[in-house]
Amino acid sequence: MSAERPQPTLDPAGDAEDRMVAMHSDPRFDNLRRTFVSFVLPVSIAFLAWYLLYVLMSAYARDFMGTVLFGDVNVALVFGILQFISTFGIAILYARFAGRKLDPQADALRDELSGAGVGNGLRGDRA
């Protein structure tokens, strides 16, 4: 038995389900999935660790979190605001990453899957 997978062929006239199955085993689709996971997994782990730190500090380091920095602003409030800022920052980073790395690959695969030709005039090219 060979270790290599046979290269799928996408027949534009073929059944849509057959084309989707063939695309799922396409190495380009695997690359797209790997690219997606290579961004999402580490960022998700980092954000969850950051959030868990916030929760644990709020539960077990109440004196530290209650430390007044100035006026009515304490460490807990700053941590909470930083949670929102990091959430929006991650969303912006992901949008840029997806636009640069994921969308061009996904567009090419979708066009091939739907049988649309390159430069069909329906969408602008992303660079």
Image (spheres, rainbow, N blue to C red):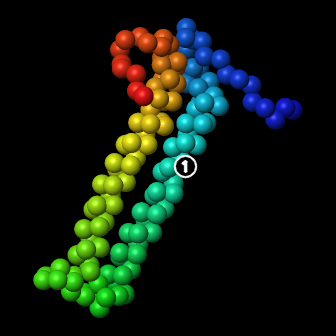
Q: Residue furthest bottom?
A: 63
Residue drawn where x is 33% and y is 55% of the image:
89
Q: Residue furthest right?
A: 1
Residue 9 x, y percent position in the rendering = 65, 17
Nearer to us in this view, 61 or 78? 78
Residue drawn where x is 40% and y is 75% of the image:
53
- Left or right: 97 with respect to 19? left
Residue 61 visible in the shown view: yes
Nearer to us in this view, 21 or 28? 28
- Left or right: 18 with respect to 77? right
Q: Which amino acid type is marked by label 1?
A: Ser
Residue 30 x, y percent position in the rendering = 61, 36
Q: From what the image shows, is residue 98 above or below residue 119?
A: below
Residue 60 x, y percent position in the rendering = 37, 87
Residue drawn where x is 87% and y is 32% of the image:
1
Q: How many marks?
A: 1
Q: From what the image shows, is residue 4 above or below residue 108?
A: below
Residue 58 x, y percent position in the rendering = 32, 81
- For mark 1, what is the residue? 38
Q: From what the image shows, is residue 34 above or below residue 18?
A: below
Q: From what the image shows, is residue 53 above or below residue 116?
A: below
Q: Quadrant of residue 103?
A: top left
Residue 21 visible in the shown view: no
The kind of secondary structure element at disc 1 is helix
Answer few, some or many: residues within 10 Å of disc 1's Cα (few below 14, many 20 plus, some between 14 and 19).
few
Q: Residue furthest left?
A: 71
Residue drawn where x is 42% and y is 28% of the image:
127
- Left or right: 32 with respect to 83? right
